[in-house]
Amino acid sequence: MTKESELNVDCANAQQKDPGHMYSDLPEAKVNTEVVLLEKYQAFSAEIVRLSLLGVVVFGFLYKEVFAKAAFCDMAFELPAYLVWIAISSIVVFSLATVLALTFRYLSTEALRYYVAGLRYQEEEKNEKKMVKMCLAKRDDKLNQAYMFKLSAVVAFGLGAAMLGVFVAMLLYEIWVNT
């Protein structure tokens, strides 16, 4: 069996057919170490999600509170097209950062699932080394994917924040010039 076809065997799902295997005791210290690490990673991605959604909300606030009130005060001016495109681009990039961070959370949870599956195989009396290796290879694959999504989420969030800063600066400049 090649390494690629080994990765296609889902070692975690294979365990579900054997209830004795699924409910076997696991070494708590090994599992807790991995869970603590997962929680820290997911707390970081939760902040990316929260801040990205906050970035999207800023544009809703500006539209509702600033532009709507400016129309009543005879301060309304035509928003230049380049500012509209910066705003739309920033919203899209913040949304992309949210999706990437949520995908990271999913993949890191899957990596933990494969780690626990490999640990269950290792703790059995049969000590199925082939299945342990398959589970850990699948875990490493999920972790590599998760790291790429985390990096992409951070870059997308940074780009969205920079675009938001440019939008606000240029908006203030336009208001200053036009009043």
Image: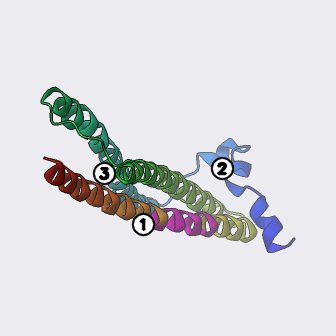
Q: CA distance from mark 3 to mark 1?
A: 13 Å
Q: Which residue is mark 3?
A: 51
The span shown in magenta is 140-151
Q: Around disc 1, counting alpha carbons within 10 Å, would you say few (fewer than 14), some (14 to 19), or many (20 or more)?
A: some
Tell which of 30 and 20 is nearer to you: 30
**In the rendering, at what x and y percent does residue 13 appear?**
70, 49
Tag 2: amino acid: His
**In the rendering, at what x and y percent does residue 15 appear?**
70, 50
Q: Around disc 2, counting alpha carbons within 10 Å, would you say few (fewer than 14), some (14 to 19), or many (20 or more)?
A: some
Earlier in the chain: of badge 3 and badge 1, it is 3
Q: Which residue is mark 2?
A: 21
Kind of element beneath mark 3: helix
Say whether residue 139 is left or right of residue 14: left
**In the rendering, at what x and y percent does residue 135 appear?**
66, 64
In the drawing, what numbered circle is on residue 155? 1
Say whether residue 145 is left or right of residue 156: right
Our reading of the magenta stretch's main secondary structure is helix
Kind of element beneath mark 2: helix
- Above or below: residue 136 compared with residue 55: below
User: Which residue does the image show at 34% across and 51% down from the upper left?
Assistant: 83
Tell which of 18 and 134 is nearer to you: 134
* Residue 29 visible, this orientation: no
- Considering the image in quadrants, where does the N terminus appear? bottom right
Tell which of 164 and 17 is nearer to you: 164
